[in-house]
Amino acid sequence: MTPSCDALRRNSSQSILDAIGNTPLLRLPSIEGDLPGTELYAKAEWLNPGGSVKDRPAARMICEGIQAGLLTPQRRILDATSGNTGIAYAMIGAALGYGVTLCIPSNITPERKRILKAYGPELIYTDPLEGSDGAIREARRRFADDPDRVFYPDQYNNCFNWRAHYDTTAVEIWEQTAGRVTHFVAGLGTSGTFMGTGRRLRELNPLIALASVQPDAPFHGLEGLKHMETAIVPGIYDDTLADRDLRVATDDAYAMTRRLAAEEGLLVGISSGASLVGAMKMLHDD
């Protein structure tokens, strides 16, 4: 019998699900040097067990699916991913005993492919030129062909994606800054991190400045982020939430990841680099 999320938590004091969240805020003293009088922090989501912020919504969507009776022992988890959510699905699926099928662009990074294969999901590679949109179309097709045999969280349109951040990420940031946070910046992929965290922070402080980050062109190298004008727009995305929508070039994001490694000792992904470039733009303009 496949355990539920609640049962796993009850039966283990160190469940993989309990390890998700409560990540630290790390100050960036070297980068701050470009912005006198500013305190700059990064939420260290790479310390989640699956290595990214996507552990939060993946766990929430799976647990809600179980509780609603949509994910049963007879069904596999199916979704489209650009990498990190897929890793989270595969990790949690392995822990809970569910099969996982992931539709994913074939040009994801080699390390992501190796991590995914270690967890054992079925991988359906899609046309790299179609990006995450191609993976979304393939997941939709497979769900339509066999809806009774799969649980399709549909992360781009699932309210529990952004709810995971509304209930956890935002609250952690608020508490870790003792309510002093004045700006929040995040990239747009599914948009769940920005939408959920931004909504809650705005409720806690109506004056907080919110900025979204996306690639500056349709063809880009910012894996995990969407150029909204030319992509399938997530159903959970609301473009009215952001005070500013910032466009970041791929080269600038890569340069920032190298700077974070060299000056702050932090090895982060390209979307993190893009978010920090966006934050610097926002703060320079304020």
Image (cartoon, rainbow, N blue to C red):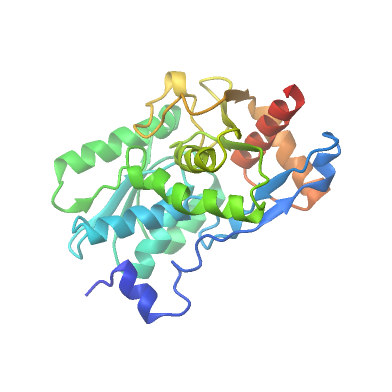
Camera sees residue 52: no
Left or right of 204? Residue 60 is left
Q: Residue at x 81, y 40 (%)?
A: 32
Left or right of 229? Residue 282 is right
Near-viewer residue (178 or 172): 178
Q: Residue at x 53, y 22 (%)?
A: 219
Total marks in image: 0
Position of residue 245 relative to residue 273, above or below, is: above
Near-viewer residue (274 or 282): 282
Q: Could you tell me residue 35's position as x and y percent?
A: 82, 34
Position of residue 85 relative to residue 233, above or below, is: below
Q: Could you tell me residue 178's position as x and y percent?
A: 66, 53
Q: Quadrant of the C terminus?
A: top right
Q: Could you tell me residue 9's position as x and y percent?
A: 38, 74
Q: Residue at x 71, y 47 (%)?
A: 41
Q: Could you tell me residue 39's position as x and y percent?
A: 77, 43
Q: Residue at x 52, y 63 (%)?
A: 49
Camera sees residue 2: yes
Q: Quadrant of the N terminus?
A: bottom left
Quarter of the view holding residue 181: top right
Near-viewer residue (111 or 149): 149
Left or right of 177? Residue 108 is left
